[in-house]
Image (cartoon, rainbow, N blue to C red):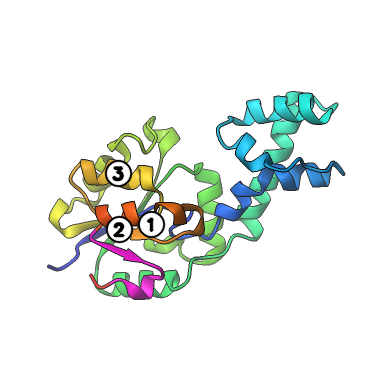
């Protein structure tokens, strides 16, 4: 069946960006010349940014105000997207192929718009996407199918001819439960969920060159 539309997640799917999120707290503390405790990533993963800032104050004795810590962390993230984050293997070539086949494409991401735009522009792939939808703008995270529903409305393509590319299990569970076709994209951050993702998706790929759609 000819593909008419494709919806792409950003982090861990098109962008090899999960390491910055996984190492963010550690890198921030090291910049402050503070040695992170073992297991810091596990401690922080369920925390919001304000909660993480409070943890740095209480557990590591940082004297900066909470707002200052949040701002400094946000600057670290912004610089990574603006200057460093790389594409996943085969992504640029695959996007070019889809464009040549007149497949309509958009982004559906939990990442903030300014970060997404800066990375896509720098990597030279912004032109492939007719729009970027973000969780904050649609006011729903990926535990809710709303962002995918809005994407399909924008692309104006039937569900049977639309594919979502996602790496994260929770997002894949949401999309498949809502009746979407989903291709799972391998990312090391979700390697422990591989079997479940394979069971839910129509294909599980390690590189975009593997996609057989």
Which residue, given by chain and number where applicable, does mark 3 sit on?
173
Q: Earlier in the sequence, mark 2 or mark 3?
A: 3
**Quadrant of the rendering where the C terminus is positioned:** bottom left
Please report contact status of discs 2 and 1: CB closer than 8 Å, yes or no.
yes
> Callout 1: few (<14), some (14-19), or many (20+) C-alpha neighbours within 10 Å?
some
At label 2, counting other C-alpha atoms closer than 10 Å, the crowd grade (few under 14, some 14-19, many 20 or more) is some
Does 177 sit above or below residue 91?
above
SS label for mark 1: helix
Describe the element under mark 3 as helix, strand or loop: helix
Q: Earlier in the sequence, mark 3 or mark 1?
A: 3
Q: Nearer the viewer, residue 90 or 122?
A: 90
Which label sits in the foreground, 3 or 1?
1
Quarter of the image that includes the N terminus: bottom left
- Judged left or right of residue 156, residue 89 is right
Determine which of the numbered discs, if any, sits on residue 194 in the image. Answer: 1
Percent of width and height locating residue 145? 28, 38
Q: Is residue 145 left or right of residue 117?
A: left
Q: Position of residue 149 (x, y in %)?
A: 24, 41
Q: Is residue 59 left or right of residue 124?
A: right
Q: Residue at x 75, y 30 (%)?
A: 56
Label 2, secondary structure: give it. Answer: helix
Q: Front-most of 186 and 118?
A: 186
* First to last magenta residue range: 202-211
In space, the residues marked 2 and 3 are separated at their CA atoms by 11 Å
Which mark identifies residue 198?
2
Mark 3 Cα within 10 Å, few/some/many (few <14, many 20+)? some
Coordinates of residue 82 in the picture (x, y in percent): 63, 55
Mark yes or no: residue 25 visible: yes
């Amino acid at each position: 069946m000819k593909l008419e539309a494709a919806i792409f997640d950003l982090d861990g799917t098109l962008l090899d960006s999960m390491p910055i999120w996984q190492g963010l707290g550690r890198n921030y503390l090291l910049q402050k010349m503070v040695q992170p405790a073992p297991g810091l990533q596990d401690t922080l993963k369920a925390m919001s940014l304000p909660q993480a800032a409070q943890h740095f104050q209480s557990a590591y004795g940082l004297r900066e105000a909470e707002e200052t810590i949040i701002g400094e962390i946000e600057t670290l993230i912004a610089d990574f997207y603006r200057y460093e984050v790389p594409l996943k293997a085969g992504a640029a070539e695959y996007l070019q192929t889809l464009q040549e086949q007149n497949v309509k494409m958009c982004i559906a991401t939990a990442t903030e718009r300014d970060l997404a735009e800066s990375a896509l522009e720098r990597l030279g792939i912004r032109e492939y996407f007719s729009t970027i939808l973000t969780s904050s703008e649609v006011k729903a995270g990926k535990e809710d199918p709303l962002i995918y529903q809005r994407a399909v409305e924008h692309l104006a393509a039937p569900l049977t001819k639309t594919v979502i590319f996602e790496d994260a299990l929770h997002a894949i569970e949401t999309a498949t439960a809502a009746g979407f076709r989903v291709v799972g994209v391998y990312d090391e951050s979700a390697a422990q969920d591989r079997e479940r993702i394979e069971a839910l998706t129509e294909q599980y790929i390690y590189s975009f060159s593997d996609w057989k759609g």
